[in-house]
Every structure is written in C-alpha cells, then in structure tokens.
Amino acid sequence: MMQNKRPRWSPEELDLLGDRDKTYAELREILPHRTIRSIKKHCQIIGIYRSKESRRKSGQFLSPTECEKILQDEKFTQKVDGCLLGDACIPRPGRALSFCTANKEYLEHLQSYFGKKLKSTARINHNAAKSEMRDDGETWNTHDSYSIRYGRIGIFGHFYKRWYKNGSKRVPNDLRLSPELCLRWYIDDGSMRSTQGMQITLHTDGFLKPEVENLCRKFNGIGIPAKVGLVGYRKDGETKCTIRIFGKDVISFLKYIGPSPVKSYAYKWHLRGYKERSLTCPFCGKKVRCWGFAPRKSCGARKCSDQIYTLDRERKNRQSREAYQLRKDRKIKNGT
Ligand SMILES: [Zn+2]
C-alpha cells in the first residue's frame, strides 16, 4: 500500500486556491510542496478555475498583467468611457460590458475592436421585435435590436467601481473629454438639428443636473462652448438636462471628433450646406467671414442692415406698383 507522504490540504492552502487571478503555475510557486496535478484536482473540488482553464486553452484568457496593460491603454479607456456616457452599460456586479443598439453595423464596428482587444469570441445577438401585453393592459412594443456582452471582470470591475453608485450610472469626476470619447458619446446620444440654425444636442437625460453642468464645463475647457438645456422632469422628480452646442461651434465639435466610423451614422454629420462664407459688404466694402446656410447680404452692421431693409421696401413698393399698372393696362386692352 502506498503511503501518502504529504499532509492533507489545510483550509489556509485551499483559501489560496480561491485567488482567481493566479494561474496554476503561479499557485505552484506559492505552494511549493504541492504538485500541479494536486493543485488542479483541489481547484476542481472547490469548483473554480475549470472554466478559466478552458478559456486559457482556447486562447481567450487575459492574465492579470494583460488586463493591467489594457487598462493603461488610453484609447481603450476613452472608448469605454465614451460608450458608457452613451448606451453601453456594466450590469452588476461589474463582470461585463454590455452593448445594445438597433444599429448592427455599428455593433460590428465595435466588435472588430473589442473582440480583438479583449481576446473575446463574443457574438452579436439578435433580439427580434415583439409586442407584449403589460399588467396595466397597455401593449409594449420593442424594435429589432442587437446586443453583445464582453465578460472581463478584471477590466470592467474597475470601470464599474468608477461609474456606478448604488447600482446606477454616474459620471465619474476624473472623466476627461477626448475626441475618441466624444465620438462614441455623440453616436449613441447625440443628434443634430439643421433647421433654424445649427444645433447639436447630447441627450444626457439619465444624468443629474450637477453632472451635466460639470460635463458642460469640461466642454468649455476644450474650447467648445456648450450650454445646459432643461427639457423637463424625470419620474423621480429630478430635472432632465441636455447639452447643447450652437452655430459654428457645431463645426468645431465635428472637427474635434472626426468622421463617422460607419456609413449608417453619416447623417449625424450632414451639415446641409451650413458653412463658412466670405463676403464683401456692398454698402461699406468691409470684408467679413460668416457661418450660415446661405450667403448674407451685408456685413451685419446696423447701418448696412438698415440699407438692406430700405432697399427691400423700395423693391416691394416698385413691384406692387408695376403689378397694379399691369392690371390697369389689361383692363384697358379688354375694353372694360
Ligand atoms: Zn457693411
């Protein structure tokens, strides 16, 4: 009969196995008198590591050092922060980043980045439109949508701590605006209006007023003037606020974030002829540059605008005089 030379596993040793961030080899280092085989066996007994090992084998596993490296990648954190300002979320307890949108093309674009970066083979789910009867008798319609989840607790646990207070999304104080962040945010929550002047609105209804004001200050800090707009009240009584950018600052914003990464969102960049034009004032001869949909008629100074008004009035008077004369001539011709 073979004698087992090693003592039984102590609770302290088993506790060490609970550290999910350590690989078997690393565990072997802190437990020198145990074999890898024995470590594996006990991991299996207490029900951890098996799934992680299978992911490691298939090349989908990120080690703690790899996670750390990804978290230090500025482009990655800016992208995730931007998506979180928009529609993305991290469900409790912070194991995964989840996207849900009606635009499949954009989700594929995100997948091409996040899938590679996070070594994930997560796939896009299609959630078909449905109609449900609610308890209060009203029907609840949903549209076709697509979703994807990237599970990486070592990375998104960090974002969850920064972004969530008591389970709801809050803008972190250390948030820094960058082109990458604003681009993701604008795609999810931004809209452009181009009638009656240019305006970009960032729909920040989900955040509290002080947070929106803080974001506005950050915009002013990067040289893009923005204003808080009040749009009503939420169910919990808090004010609903949006961020608005006007006129030529719209162009500054679009230049700052760069072009749309997907064709299906290009309409959010469509300026409909709004551009900067130069003109020489026909009244005072001054050269000016101004923004608008159509060329202006004067430099905008009071004296020159008044002249346009006078000319307009004279033209209208002349036209009505001519029309009157025409009618009179016709009457004479017809002999009435
Ligand atoms: Zn003028």
Image (cartoon, helix red, strand yellow):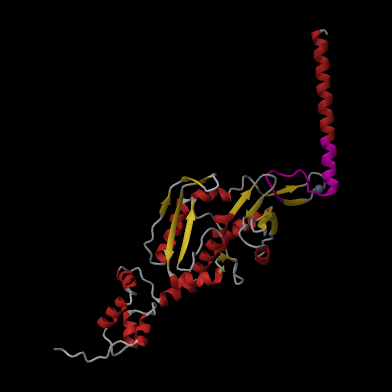
Magenta stretch: includes residue 161: no
Location of residue 14 by image quarter:
bottom left
Q: Is residue 262 left or right of residue 324?
A: left
Judging depth in this view, the residue of 300 and 123 nearest the camera is 123
Q: Residue furthest left?
A: 1
Judging depth in this view, the residue of 289 and 51 nearest the camera is 51
Q: Position of residue 54 (x, y in %)?
A: 30, 70
| Residue 91 seen in this snapshot | yes
Q: Is residue 191 left or right of residue 307?
A: left
The residue under the point 64% across, 59% down is: 236
Q: Position of residue 198 (x, y in %)?
A: 67, 49
The quarter of the image holding the C terminus is top right
Judging depth in this view, the residue of 18 and 170 nearest the camera is 18
| Position of 316 relative to 11 (above/below) | above
Magenta part of the chain? 290-312
The quarter of the image holding the N terminus is bottom left
